Amino acid sequence: MLTNKSLIAPSDFTLEEIEELLALSERVIESPARYADACKGKLLASLFYEPSTRTKFSFDAAMLRLGGSTLGFSDPNTSSTAKGETIADSARTVGKYADVIVVRHPKEGTAKLMSRYADCPVINAGDGGHHHPTQTLTDLLTIRHYKGDFGGLTVGVCGDLKFGRTIHSLVTCLARYQNVRFLFISPEELNMPAFVKEELIAKGVPFTETADLEGSISQLDVLYMSRVQRERFISEEEYLRLKDFFILTADKMRLARQDMIVMHPLPRINEIATEVDADPRAAYFEQVKFGMYVRMALIMKLLGAGEPQD
Ligand code: NCD
């Protein structure tokens, strides 16, 4: 039962609940008009303490397409945060106005903290370099669309595995499915953090670490690219040294299987050459669309909105 739950990390939902959400997303994709009033009269508050294009707009679009309304900020300097209000007090306050809160914050743990104080469910839209569970739901819906199932996949995640919160959420979630295998492709400085690797080891999920994209690409069913997370670096010099470590080009795509898909949470900086966009295996802009539908399903479930009657 998802009603009134908060979503901080993918592990907050059971695989059955995730299945329920993906199934509802697919029904919404089939006939979006049926759901046009599903959240009528409900209010979604989005508090973005960090920049966003897709996550913010897809939540807004999702709520509006369900007949609900939205309010919030994307610049914390326009809120009482600028006066020194604590996260706990902001959560207590906004939770009195809204039916659901979506929060993105540079500090790990902020969404969890808010969920303790708000009177309504809180959705983590990214907490520092930690988790980004709604991107994972987006990614799962995308993988399901192209691959049918999650079991048995070989998934390569490439780029900034250290700070990439979408990667931490996706890998720990996919690890719960049968026979998934990972290739972690990164420069050593941006290796997958221990909290993710320890979870895989505990579950007996196989993974290999490498810095060789060209040598690994032919093994993959899914290649998940990511940008180097500039804002999480202490040293700009270090960022500049690592930012173009991997660039996926048409030449490298020639080494990949015909049925491999390329995903990316976006924004893309340099890590996928624009020439790859025309490749039928490039799934990243379709992925964007799935993000809105899965958020429609998520909002409906958390708010306990019933399936519309025809
Ligand atoms: C990601 C994020 O914010 O973590 N963006 C997104 O929500 N699609 C990825 C990124 O910023 O690199």
Image: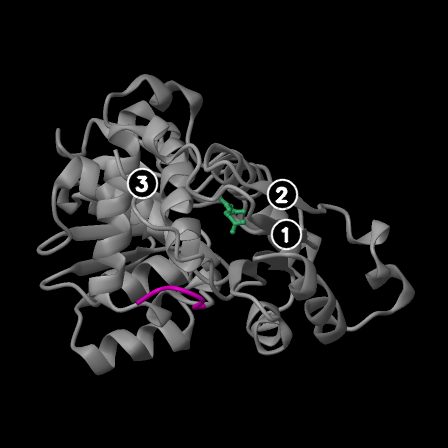
**Left or right, residue 39 beside residue 2:** right
Quadrant location of the C terminus in the rendered image:
top left
Q: Which colouring convention does the figure follow?
A: one colour
Q: Earlier in the sequence, mark 3 or mark 1?
A: 1
| Residue range (magenta) | 1-5
**Image height check: is 105 above or below 42?**
below
Query: Disc 1 beta carbon < 8 A from ligand 1?
Result: no
Q: Which comes before the other along the chain, label 2 or label 1?
A: 1
Please tell me whether mark 3 or mark 1 is closer to you in this view.
3
Specify the quadrant that holds the N terminus.
Answer: bottom left
With 72 as the anchor, is 218 left or right in this view?
Answer: left
Q: Which secondary structure lies at badge 1? A: strand
Q: Earlier in the sequence, mark 2 or mark 3?
A: 2
Name of the residue lying farthest toward the right: 83
The image shows residue 53 at horizontal and vertical percentages of 59, 37
Q: Residue at x 36, y 46 (%)?
A: 297
Q: Residues within 10 Å of mark 3 (few under 14, many from 20)?
A: few
Neighbor class of circle 2 (other Cα within 10 Å; few <14, some 14-19, many 20+) is some
Residue placed under numbered mark 3 in the picture:
308
Displayed quadrant of residue 167: bottom left
Does any atom of ligand 1 lie closer than 8 Å to the CB of label 2?
no
Q: What amino acid is at disc 2?
A: Thr
Separation of disc 2 and disc 1 at Cα?
A: 6 Å
Nearest the camera: 199 or 96? 96
Foreground pick, 232 / 1: 1
Q: In the rendered view, does 202 fall on the left or right side of 242?
A: left
